[in-house]
Amino acid sequence: MSELPGRGRVLVVEDDRVARELLEEILRSAGLEVDAAALGDEAIRRAGDGHDLVITDVRLGDGPSGMEVLAAFQVQAVLTPVIVITAFGDVTGAMEAIQRGAHDYISKPFNVEELVLTVRRALERRRLLEENRALRSSPGGAVPRGRLEDIVGKSPLMLDVYKLVARVAASQSTVLVVGESGTGKELVARAIHSHSPRAQAPFVAVNCTALSESLLESELFGHAKGAFTGALSARRGLFEEASGGTLFLDEIGDVGTKMQAQLLRVLQEGEIRRVGGSEAVKIDVRVVAATNRDLEHDVKAGRFRDDLYFRINVVTIRLPPLRERPSDIPLLVDHFLAKYAKREGRTDAGIAPAAEAALSRHAWPGNVRELENVIERSLALSKNGFILLSDLPPEIGASVALPPMGLHDDRPTIKELERRYIDLILKETGGNKKRAAEILGIDRRTLYRTLEREGREGREEEEEEEEEEEEEEG
């Protein structure tokens, strides 16, 4: 099951334990954080807990009903969409929920793919509402996201990317961003949008591989009332949601031939037709597409329409894989280390030179996304927020040999093993004795005295640090 992008903390309200646990499993498999409540009064008490979405059954046994949960969230968490679960065929209950302000409804028994689609749309609507609120409240009307400065890298290949983004942003041209998975294609698309005349309008992203072709059609173009079973009212698609702004079509190379023909018509005519509808709806949307495929090869093989390829390939921006820009790895490491240290409340996070060297040598098949995941994981496993070589995943840390410190034929004494271990930690911390002492679990002065006894350090260094600390305190 594909993961849902962006924020996603969901409150599931369901008194039936089996149904509740099934919903939790489906949503967690889609990459969402899930909380659960069995009763309506518990859900109402949690209306201020900052959930991004609520899914509630209408009937919740004793106590407040799902309609009352809906009413409470409309007062206490006005931006939080509520999806209501109704019994199969309960059209009256579904209509009442919509009229009272529910984002949508799901009938039991529910289809997993339709459930995930409904959740995705609700979270996307929430994001758009937040963006619009930020537009109204921020100075100059600029939304603080998707800046060119958010793309990390100073290598010549990345400088070329920045130049292209800056040049194409002000135009209305369709842009094709190509690159391997994890290179940051959506980040580039957001930067194009935020530096364009459309920056104050919505940026709407859709992953074309996340949905079947029929669901993608409804997602992009919307549907007319009665277009299919359960379509009780007309609904706008993402082309209309992105009106005046930018629609980002991620992994466009994976769409089928029918959808390719529909997208070509939209780009040519500047209008869409909702599923089941006959009326043309004019749209004003800039399209930025992305793919990790070789579309030229797919065109020659007959898998991708050449006319659509020429339509989306007005300007191409190629994102280099991380292995082609190793000089950017230390910058990215610092960027992600600062990001996750801030999230975890660590003020003294760092990384050992040996660990950073191992990261720089790795090939990174998953590119920037893989590097970010490794930094997040390693920081979580580290002691005192300082990433050592041993904190890295085995496939990365194993590429750099550690200095020997184990048992040898000379059968070292405990004292000798202690000396070797101190040497190892000092090497990993780049000679930073304060950090080494923290990792060793001893006082820094104890470390200085141990080194002094071995004749490797003098007391002068300790006294100099003490004087510096006194000056800082003074």
Image (spheres, rainbow, N blue to C red):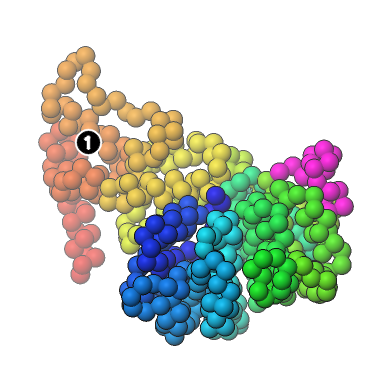
User: Is 173 on the left-hand or right-hand side of 70?
Assistant: right
User: Is 294 on the left-hand or right-hand side of 414?
Assistant: right
Classed neighbour count for the residue bearing mark 1: other residues with Cα under 10 Å, few (<14), some (14–19), many (≥20): many
Residue range in magenta is: 293-309
Q: Residue at x 31, y 52 (%)?
A: 385
Q: Residue at x 85, y 62 (%)?
A: 265
Of residues 414 and 469, the one nearer the viewer is 414
Q: How many marks?
A: 1
**Outermost residue, top side:** 409
* Residue 468, quarter of picture: bottom left
Residue of label 1? 422
Of residues 444 and 134, the one nearer the viewer is 134
* Residue 325, quarter of picture: top right
**Magenta-span inclusion, residue 131:** no
Q: Residue at x 71, y 71 (%)?
A: 226
User: Is 321 on the left-hand or right-hand side of 421?
Assistant: right
Q: Position of residue 81 (x, y in %)?
A: 51, 74
**Magenta-span inclusion, residue 303:** yes
User: Is 156 on the left-hand or right-hand side of 265?
Assistant: left
Task: Determine the secondary structure under disc 1.
Answer: helix
Quadrant including the C terminus: bottom left
Residue 64 vertical placement versus 158 (above, below): below
Q: Position of residue 196 (x, y in %)?
A: 70, 70
Visible residue check, residue 166: no
* Residue 282, quarter of picture: bottom right
Of residues 180 and 88, the one nearer the viewer is 88
Q: Residue at x 60, y 49 (%)?
A: 183
Residue 387 vertical placement versus 233 (above, below): above
Residue 209 vertical placement versus 233 (above, below): above
Q: Position of residue 195 (x, y in %)?
A: 67, 69
**Three-letter code for the amino acid on which mark 1 is drawn:** Ile
